[in-house]
Amino acid sequence: MLILGLILFGMLIGALAQLILGRKRGRIDWTMAIVAGLVGSFVGGLLASLLSGDGLELRPSGIIGSIVGAIIVTAIWRFAGDRSKA
């Protein structure tokens, strides 16, 4: 159940990152949402939680860090995709 919860949380965070950056072609890319959400949550959430002194518990600092991390991963993914097409 924990793994399904982490995937669902990552998917929601990744979708939120795409909504913040703007959707391409008017819809959410769910593959990018899952990957960006999981990677961004791991890196951004872990760093924000540890830097704020919250440890590994679910706190607002970790959630905010997850969103910021997912936004960064989504932006890098889009930038790399745009450069490979050009």
Image (cartoon, helix red, strand yellow):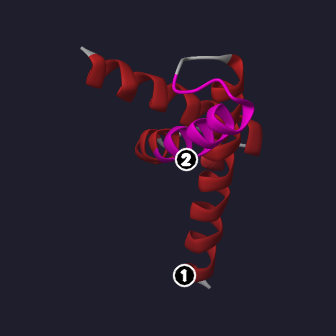
Residue 8 painted magenta: no
Closer to us: 54 or 35: 54
Q: Is residue 4 visible?
A: yes
Report the span colored magenta. Answer: 39-56
Residue at horizontal 46%, vertical 31%? 11
* Residue plotted at (38% across, 25% down): 6
Query: Is 17 on the left-hand or right-hand side of 57?
Result: right
Q: Nearer the viewer, residue 30 or 72?
A: 72
Which secondary structure type mostly characterizes the magenta part of the structure?
helix
User: As shown in the figure, which amino acid type bears the numbered disc 2?
Assistant: Val
Q: Residue at x 57, y 30 (%)?
A: 13
Q: Which mark is residue 48?
A: none
Q: Residue furthest left?
A: 1
Q: Position of residue 68 (x, y in %)?
A: 71, 41
Q: Is residue 23 visible?
A: no
Whole-percent x, y for residue 39 in the image: 48, 47
Q: Earlier along the polypeptide chain: callout 2 or callout 1?
A: 2
Residue 84: which numbered mark, if any?
1
For the C terminus, give its image quadrant. Answer: bottom right
- Dot 1, crowdedness within 10 Å: few (<14), some or many (≥20)? few
Nearest the viewer among 35 and 63 is: 63
Query: Which residue in the protein does label 2 denote?
Result: 43
Q: Which numbered mark, 2 or 1, is in the foreground of this view? A: 2
Residue 54 within the magenta-colored segment of the rendering: yes
What amino acid is labelled 1 in the image? Ser
- Report the number of discs: 2
SS class, disc 1: helix
Q: Position of residue 57 (x, y in %)?
A: 53, 19
**Residue most extreme to the bottom:** 86
Left or right for 55, reference 68: left
Name the element at disc 2.
helix
